[in-house]
Amino acid sequence: MLRYSAAIQTGLFAKPIAEGDIVYLQAKDFDENGNLRSSLHPEIKADYITDKHLLRSGDILFAAKGTKNFAAVFENHNEPAVASTSFFVIRLTQKNILPHFLVWFLNHPSTQKLLKGQAIGTSIVSISKAVLEQIEVPVPDIKTQRAILQIAQLRIEERKLKQQVEVLREKQIQQKLLNAVKL
């Protein structure tokens, strides 16, 4: 197991406007599972944005403020984007760790528990950059990382299928009960 190397920076503070040049990612742009919503539009002007703040494919966004802390991989969809101050942007500097693996690790319940245990603040809790930098991430070889990600994805799909089966089963039972009343 190896450690990984990454640069961590805070997101940018900007005031969104109706018509902008750059997408301004905020926590509200993600669903309850940390997935980026598809309906995004540019909300800030490019005037004061430097290249260091522009997100690149593979950057990891970590929501550090509030009660819902999550990590997500940014995948560029041709629109330039920056992260708000709600996020830390983690940019991997070595190729020994896959961005999706680090996201999986940061979103894992045991890591989330550890991070939340070190959160600071009373009204709006937040996880500091120092806490994030101190997290020890076991880094297996790339093949093992891919296998872990594949198993995790299959588990998500299994849960969705079980939920769909439960909904269909409930409809079936309710229909049978209704049919019994209509005898």
Image (cartoon, grey):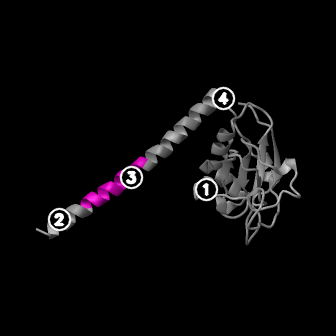
Q: Nearer the viewer, mark 2 or mark 4?
A: 2
In percent of width and height, residue 67 lies at 66, 63
In percent of width and height, residue 96 lies at 73, 30
In percent of width and height, residue 92 lies at 77, 39
User: Circle 1: is it few (<14), some (14-19), or many (20+) Cα within 10 Å?
Assistant: few
On residue 164, the disc is 3
Quadrant of res 117:
bottom right
Residue at x 44% of width, y 44% of height: 158
Q: Nearer the viewer, mark 1 or mark 3?
A: 1
Q: CA distance from mark 1 to mark 4?
A: 28 Å
Q: Main secondary structure of the magenta part?
A: helix
Question: Pointer 4: what residue?
Answer: 142
In percent of width and height, residue 68 lies at 65, 60
Element carrying mark 2: helix
Question: Pointer 1: what residue?
Answer: 37
Residues at badges 2 and 1 in contact (C-beta under 8 Å)?
Answer: no
Q: CA distance from mark 2 to mark 1?
A: 41 Å
Magenta part of the protein: which range? 161-173
Name which of mark 3 and mark 4 comes first in the sequence. 4
Quadrant of res 122:
bottom right
Question: Pointer 2: what residue?
Answer: 179
What's under tag 4, amino acid-wise? Ile
Element carrying mark 4: helix
Q: Nearer the viewer, mark 1 or mark 4?
A: 1
Name which of mark 2 and mark 3 comes first in the sequence. 3
Q: CA distance from mark 1 to mark 3?
A: 22 Å
User: Circle 3: is it few (<14), some (14-19), or many (20+) Cα within 10 Å?
Assistant: few
Within the magenta stretch, is there residue 165? Answer: yes
User: Circle 2: is it few (<14), some (14-19), or many (20+) Cα within 10 Å?
Assistant: few
